[in-house]
Amino acid sequence: MRKAIVSIVTICLLLPISITAQSISKKELKEKVRQYRIEHEHEIIKELVDFLSIPNNADDQPNIRRNAELIKSMMEKRGITAQVMETGGSPLVYGELTVPGAARTIMFYAHFDGQAVDPSKWIDQEAFTPILRPGKMEAGETGPEPIPFPKTGERYQDDWRIYARSASDDKSPITALLTAMDALKSIGVPLGSNVRFIFEGEEEASSPNLMSFAENNPDLFNAEVLYICDGPMYYSNQPTLKYGARGIVTINITVYGPNTNVHSGHFGNWAPNPGFKLARLLTSMRDEDGYVLVDGFYDTVTPLSDREKQALADIPPYDEELKELYGFLQSEGSGKSLMELINRPSLNIRGLESAWVGSQARTVIPSEATAAIDIRLVKGNEPADMVEKVKRHVRRQGFYIVSDDPDRETRMNYANIVKITGDGGYPASRTSMDLPISLLTIEALTGYHDDDVVLVPTSGGSVPLYIFTKYMDLPTISVPIVNHDNNQHQPNENLRIGHYWQGIETFAAILTYVK
Amino acid sequence: MRKAIVSIVTICLLLPISITAQSISKKELKEKVRQYRIEHEHEIIKELVDFLSIPNNADDQPNIRRNAELIKSMMEKRGITAQVMETGGSPLVYGELTVPGAARTIMFYAHFDGQAVDPSKWIDQEAFTPILRPGKMEAGETGPEPIPFPKTGERYQDDWRIYARSASDDKSPITALLTAMDALKSIGVPLGSNVRFIFEGEEEASSPNLMSFAENNPDLFNAEVLYICDGPMYYSNQPTLKYGARGIVTINITVYGPNTNVHSGHFGNWAPNPGFKLARLLTSMRDEDGYVLVDGFYDTVTPLSDREKQALADIPPYDEELKELYGFLQSEGSGKSLMELINRPSLNIRGLESAWVGSQARTVIPSEATAAIDIRLVKGNEPADMVEKVKRHVRRQGFYIVSDDPDRETRMNYANIVKITGDGGYPASRTSMDLPISLLTIEALTGYHDDDVVLVPTSGGSVPLYIFTKYMDLPTISVPIVNHDNNQHQPNENLRIGHYWQGIETFAAILTYVK
């Protein structure tokens, strides 16, 4: 990290704004915010627990609206002008806080809906009755016995965890942000910028109305940056800023054999086997190290800047721990690190199917074989262009491409037929680390926490940040605060208390120093 | 066929038995058997229909026993000494008929149990209530309207079909054989040999007790040939003799990625993808024409004899019709014919599975990918040896083979792990066409029907004939009589009347001339 910090400071000296004219030192700010939190642990957790107690499946509109109303009242309690707004689907909550004399406007995004719950999979608890356990519980396993929530005046321990749907994804960032505002108000530190808030109610349903809402309300998004408060911190639990997210496009590839499953004894060696055809086609697409052999697959990648390269080089590797966690000896990518490889587009077989295996298997030559593929995109890749490149590759392997199951005439005209269908997808997004607001955000956290800040050019998961960056010219920076081992999207989702405390401190620094 | 007939005649002249000393010419025999049938159509069909009316799923023991008792009484009606015998599973019916002065003993096999019935799939009828339709009905489609069975004295048309479970597979050969004996008795033609019969009650359940029964009762199988009366005639509907059947061994190949499905965004390009590993492994096993690249795969094949080669060359090709039927342009095997390729071992992907495809697909790197494989064997191939060759090939591709899911230590020690499990399988069988009994059987049918006899060295479907040929030194020859388009194992199974009539004539010729 040291090299990165030096270069950031150097560049910042050239910027028109003064990042040294801070009215409170980072050490002092952090200590005072921490002291505020220690004195208010009971009420801080109570606000979060009450919030987590309202079910938040995006399909459950009455409860989604109860969540929205609660957020509105929590915001108004902090002096934020807030309103519940309609999107055509779930409502969202929008808010503004104008700071006298502020030169900038920053905006925070989070979502209050949660991944669907399968109650039968939640061990020893209900998803919307938050409980406290003195440690980690793996998904689907029994964990340490629950303990009662401490009474007023009693302290929480950092390793304790709150278990409930959306404890991490993504309600806690909302209350941590509001708590940070409470702390700053209590200790008399002014906000550095005007602040806007947008809290969405259908992110887990793929944000079907967010783009049209933004198009219909462009003024609401008139800000210099959108801080995405979602997702986990880097594996090392260092403070993390993420500047982008992969895009994605999915395709299904179906290869055909005979027009019905036929007897493998009567026709084996003679009727064309679609499984082998599919295997050959897939094998032609990548080498053994995962390097994609589709012509031009990497051509449109926007190269990383020097700062992004340096940031990548500075990220402490976590690859060996992840290999241990997921139980494999050798990763793909010819020895390159996970974080580096995330900045390349990927071609992934996410599913295979042909006839039956196991106890259902029958001695047939299957009539077809299908591979479900996802292509993760990085900045510069256009979904349609990437799919077209794959199609061109498929044609070069001698296949005739159709978009529906082939009819009799097609079948009798082409020896190798493949159906390719897809979902359209969306592109990646990557905010430049060289923007003034990027540097300001880095600087706000540099030297504030004990650990160096991890700067991630592109995070692995796909999020449609392009809605903001590409169509609204609003750069996004993700500020994740929750533990990576939070069982996100799984049963027994949880939030580590120590991470929550640190998240409050992180938001306090951004609210203070980004000005 | 002409060349084959000439050579058979040449060889037969050298044999100790005289095949020319027949008391009745083929033309006369056929005409008299036909006349008998025409005069008895009503009672012939009634006996079959009554037989088909008794349900015969191998699981349905009370009805299986009713079938066995009926067969016993039908046999006794013909003077056969018959008994229902226990096997440990379904009973079988064994019978003997001693012919004064006969030099040989021939034996017939058929089975009276049927493939399981799904009543919801049978269109416009119940499986065990035989009906008559004036033509062909495809599986799962409505067909020509049923017609009443003709009254006594009314004639049947050849293209009419009886629809019921086991109409073809495999009750009709039993009644056709017994009817042939009636005809011969009626016209005063003596049987050429002593005759034994074995009718099995659990063939569709994979004959779990047949081998132990044979081992415990070797004397019952003291015959020169076992005629297997099962399966369809060759596609061209010419009279058919089959001298063997493929063996089979199945294996499942599972390749491993991470120890759980992981997020393809967070880990795509880095976590090893088992789908691509499996595709590469499968692709290494065969070339694009289906030629198996596993070292030594074809080494143990017993070469075809000159007579077998000639028989193959004489089979009228039906490949183009089958391509049309099954809707594909190009077969595997570099242009070789289906019948030729059946005499090679095959390596077939019968199923693929990894995570999910279609609407269930998720953006994961799957934890594993599985291929279900069947290897069809021909004479000379030993199942265990063939599997070992595949394993050797897999190891050469850099895989470490396990027989259970790998434990943590194995996972961290080997980059490429594959689990291979199998079912043991059984070998192929091929009776030499040069045996005296083989030649006698060919001669019995040569010049008897209007069409040439098709001689099939190996039929495609696997049948455990090795129980007889390998362990009991009892050559088998299949004498199929039913139409190939009989919806075998499917709903609306049927028997074409014209085939049934011809089958009666075929058995009459064998019973007369094999002596």
Image (tube, coloured by chain):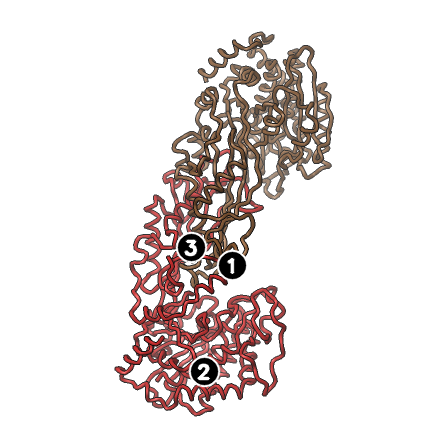
Chain colours: A brown, B red
Residue type at mark 2: give it.
Glu
For label 1, the crowd category at 10 Å Cα-Cα, with few meaning under 14, some 14 to 19 and many 20 or more, is: some
Name the chain letter of the residue that bears numbered label 1: A
Q: Are marks 3 and 1 in contact (CB under 8 Å)?
A: no
Q: Which mark is residue B505?
A: 2
Tag nearer the camera, 3 or 2 = 2
Residue type at mark 1: give it.
Thr
**Which image quadrant for residue A139?**
top right
Please tell me which residue lies in front, A507 or A284.
A284
**Residue A515, placed above or below residue A431:** above
**Which image quadrant for residue B408?**
top left
**Residue at the (59%, 19%) spot, across then down:** A505
**Which image quadrant for residue B143?**
bottom right
Residue indicated by mark 3: B373
Determine the residue located farthest toward the bottom in the rendered image: B188
Q: What secondary structure is found at the residue carrying circle 1?
A: loop
**Residue at the (47%, 78%) spot, across then down:** B174
**Residue at the (55%, 75%) spot, across then down:** B161
Q: Which mark is residue B341?
A: none
Task: Residue B463: tell me if it is visible.
Answer: no
Q: Is residue B273 left or right of residue B143?
A: left
For label 2, the crowd category at 10 Å Cα-Cα, with few meaning under 14, some 14 to 19 and many 20 or more, is: many
N-terminal of the pair, mark 3 or mark 2, is: 3
**Residue A314, placed above or below residue B154:** above
Name the chain letter of the residue that bears numbered label 2: B
**Residue at the (72%, 26%) spot, across then down:** A72
